[in-house]
Image (cartoon, rainbow, N blue to C red):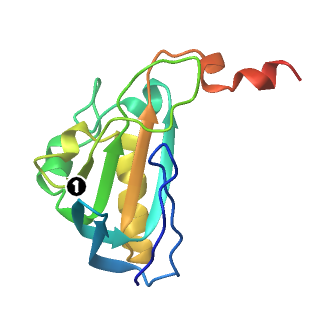
Amino acid sequence: QVKKTKADKNGNWALSFEGMPFGGPYTMEVAGKSNRIVLKDIYIGDVWLCSGQSNMEMPVHGWTSVYNYQEEIKNAEHPLIRTFNVVKGMDVDPGKDCGGEWMVCSPQTVADFSAVAYFFARKVNQELNIPVGIINASWGGTEIESWIPAGVYCN
Protein backbone atom coordinates (compact mmCIF):
# COMPACT_ATOMS: atom_id res chain seq x y z
CA GLN A 1 0.00 0.00 0.00
CA VAL A 2 1.19 3.49 -0.78
CA LYS A 3 -0.11 6.30 1.44
CA LYS A 4 0.66 10.00 1.66
CA THR A 5 0.21 12.41 4.53
CA LYS A 6 1.56 15.73 5.76
CA ALA A 7 3.02 16.51 9.14
CA ASP A 8 1.55 19.30 11.23
CA LYS A 9 3.64 22.22 12.51
CA ASN A 10 4.91 20.03 15.39
CA GLY A 11 6.00 17.21 13.08
CA ASN A 12 3.12 14.88 14.04
CA TRP A 13 1.42 12.79 11.40
CA ALA A 14 -0.87 9.75 11.16
CA LEU A 15 -1.99 7.24 8.54
CA SER A 16 -4.54 4.45 8.31
CA PHE A 17 -4.01 1.31 6.26
CA GLU A 18 -6.35 -1.20 4.70
CA GLY A 19 -6.59 -4.49 6.57
CA MET A 20 -3.94 -7.05 5.72
CA PRO A 21 -3.77 -10.79 6.39
CA PHE A 22 -2.05 -12.12 9.50
CA GLY A 23 1.57 -12.97 8.86
CA GLY A 24 4.76 -11.43 7.63
CA PRO A 25 7.48 -10.49 7.55
CA TYR A 26 6.53 -7.20 5.97
CA THR A 27 8.66 -4.13 5.26
CA MET A 28 7.52 -0.52 5.60
CA GLU A 29 9.25 2.50 4.13
CA VAL A 30 8.57 5.98 5.46
CA ALA A 31 10.04 8.79 3.39
CA GLY A 32 10.09 12.55 3.75
CA LYS A 33 11.75 15.31 1.79
CA SER A 34 15.14 14.69 3.35
CA ASN A 35 14.88 11.42 5.27
CA ARG A 36 13.96 7.80 4.62
CA ILE A 37 13.35 5.08 7.24
CA VAL A 38 12.89 1.39 6.42
CA LEU A 39 11.26 -0.82 9.04
CA LYS A 40 11.78 -4.55 8.52
CA ASP A 41 10.57 -7.77 10.12
CA ILE A 42 7.04 -6.46 10.73
CA TYR A 43 4.31 -8.99 11.51
CA ILE A 44 0.54 -8.52 11.57
CA GLY A 45 -1.33 -10.37 14.28
CA ASP A 46 -2.86 -9.87 17.71
CA VAL A 47 -1.40 -7.23 20.03
CA TRP A 48 -2.25 -7.48 23.73
CA LEU A 49 -1.64 -5.02 26.56
CA CYS A 50 -0.45 -6.75 29.74
CA SER A 51 -0.51 -4.41 32.70
CA GLY A 52 -0.49 -4.74 36.44
CA GLN A 53 1.68 -5.06 39.49
CA SER A 54 4.18 -7.72 40.52
CA ASN A 55 1.98 -10.64 39.48
CA MET A 56 2.18 -9.40 35.87
CA GLU A 57 5.74 -8.10 36.09
CA MET A 58 7.37 -11.32 37.38
CA PRO A 59 9.70 -12.60 34.64
CA VAL A 60 9.94 -16.14 33.30
CA HIS A 61 13.23 -16.66 35.20
CA GLY A 62 11.14 -15.83 38.27
CA TRP A 63 11.54 -14.02 41.54
CA THR A 64 10.25 -17.22 43.03
CA SER A 65 10.00 -20.53 41.25
CA VAL A 66 8.21 -20.54 37.90
CA TYR A 67 7.49 -24.22 37.35
CA ASN A 68 10.06 -25.80 35.02
CA TYR A 69 11.50 -22.39 34.05
CA GLN A 70 14.90 -23.70 32.89
CA GLU A 71 13.20 -26.04 30.41
CA GLU A 72 10.75 -23.31 29.35
CA ILE A 73 13.62 -20.92 28.62
CA LYS A 74 15.58 -23.57 26.71
CA ASN A 75 12.57 -24.33 24.47
CA ALA A 76 11.34 -20.76 23.94
CA GLU A 77 11.98 -20.55 20.21
CA HIS A 78 8.85 -18.63 19.16
CA PRO A 79 9.73 -16.11 16.42
CA LEU A 80 6.07 -15.09 16.01
CA ILE A 81 5.85 -13.90 19.63
CA ARG A 82 7.22 -10.43 20.39
CA THR A 83 7.20 -8.35 23.55
CA PHE A 84 7.61 -4.64 24.15
CA ASN A 85 8.57 -3.80 27.73
CA VAL A 86 7.50 -0.24 28.45
CA VAL A 87 10.27 1.69 30.23
CA LYS A 88 9.15 2.64 33.72
CA GLY A 89 8.59 6.30 34.38
CA MET A 90 6.27 8.61 36.25
CA ASP A 91 4.55 11.78 35.12
CA VAL A 92 1.42 13.64 36.11
CA ASP A 93 0.38 14.02 32.47
CA PRO A 94 0.05 11.11 30.02
CA GLY A 95 2.87 11.00 27.49
CA LYS A 96 2.64 10.64 23.73
CA ASP A 97 5.51 8.16 23.56
CA CYS A 98 7.37 5.76 25.80
CA GLY A 99 10.75 4.09 25.74
CA GLY A 100 11.29 0.42 25.04
CA GLU A 101 11.97 -1.93 22.16
CA TRP A 102 10.36 -4.98 20.60
CA MET A 103 12.09 -8.28 21.34
CA VAL A 104 11.60 -11.58 19.50
CA CYS A 105 10.91 -14.52 21.81
CA SER A 106 13.94 -16.82 21.97
CA PRO A 107 15.93 -18.70 24.62
CA GLN A 108 18.20 -15.64 24.78
CA THR A 109 15.38 -13.14 25.50
CA VAL A 110 12.46 -14.95 27.15
CA ALA A 111 13.93 -15.04 30.68
CA ASP A 112 13.03 -11.34 31.08
CA PHE A 113 9.54 -11.60 29.52
CA SER A 114 6.61 -11.28 31.93
CA ALA A 115 5.82 -14.92 32.81
CA VAL A 116 2.03 -14.39 32.66
CA ALA A 117 2.30 -12.52 29.35
CA TYR A 118 4.65 -15.12 27.83
CA PHE A 119 2.47 -18.14 28.66
CA PHE A 120 -0.61 -16.26 27.46
CA ALA A 121 1.06 -15.25 24.17
CA ARG A 122 2.35 -18.77 23.61
CA LYS A 123 -1.15 -20.22 24.06
CA VAL A 124 -2.74 -17.67 21.70
CA ASN A 125 -0.02 -18.32 19.10
CA GLN A 126 -0.42 -22.10 19.37
CA GLU A 127 -4.24 -22.02 19.24
CA LEU A 128 -4.71 -19.42 16.49
CA ASN A 129 -1.42 -19.81 14.59
CA ILE A 130 -0.97 -16.05 14.28
CA PRO A 131 1.76 -13.61 15.35
CA VAL A 132 1.29 -12.24 18.88
CA GLY A 133 2.66 -8.99 20.24
CA ILE A 134 2.68 -8.24 23.96
CA ILE A 135 2.98 -4.70 25.30
CA ASN A 136 4.11 -5.15 28.90
CA ALA A 137 3.31 -2.09 31.02
CA SER A 138 3.59 -3.66 34.46
CA TRP A 139 5.24 -2.25 37.57
CA GLY A 140 5.21 -4.14 40.84
CA GLY A 141 4.31 -2.27 44.00
CA THR A 142 2.56 0.65 42.32
CA GLU A 143 -0.64 1.96 43.85
CA ILE A 144 -3.83 1.55 41.82
CA GLU A 145 -4.37 5.33 41.87
CA SER A 146 -1.28 5.80 39.70
CA TRP A 147 -3.00 3.86 36.88
CA ILE A 148 -6.23 5.91 36.95
CA PRO A 149 -6.57 9.21 35.04
CA ALA A 150 -6.91 12.19 37.41
CA GLY A 151 -10.26 13.19 35.85
CA VAL A 152 -11.84 9.96 37.06
CA TYR A 153 -11.47 11.07 40.68
CA CYS A 154 -13.51 14.21 40.01
CA ASN A 155 -16.59 12.24 38.96
Few, some or many C-alpha atoms within 10 Å of disc 1 (few <14, some 14-19, many ≥20)? many
- Vertical arrangement, residue 10 with respect to residue 76, above or below: above
Q: Is residue 55 left or right of residue 145?
A: left
Q: Residue at x 58, y 15 (%)?
A: 143
The percent position of residue 70, horizontal first and vertical second, equals 14, 42
The percent position of residue 52, horizontal first and vertical second, equals 52, 31
53 or 135: nearer the eye? Answer: 135
Quarter residue 81 falls in: bottom left
Q: Residue at x 52, y 81 (%)?
A: 19
Q: Residue at x 66, y 17 (%)?
A: 145
Q: Which element type, helix, strand or loop, lies under badge 1? A: strand
Q: Residue at x 38, y 36 (%)?
A: 86
Q: Is residue 87 left or right of residue 54?
A: left
The percent position of residue 68, horizontal first and vertical second, equals 22, 43
The percent position of residue 6, horizontal first and vertical second, equals 48, 63
User: Residue at the right extreme?
Assistant: 155
Disc 1 marks which residue? 105
- Vertical arrangement, residue 77 with respect to residue 24, above or below: above
Question: Looking at numbered disc 1 in the image, what kind of residue is underneath it?
Answer: Cys
109 or 124: nearer the eye? Answer: 109
Total numbered labels: 1
Quadrant location of the N terminus in the rendered image? bottom left
Quadrant location of the C terminus in the rendered image? top right
98 or 111: nearer the eye? Answer: 98
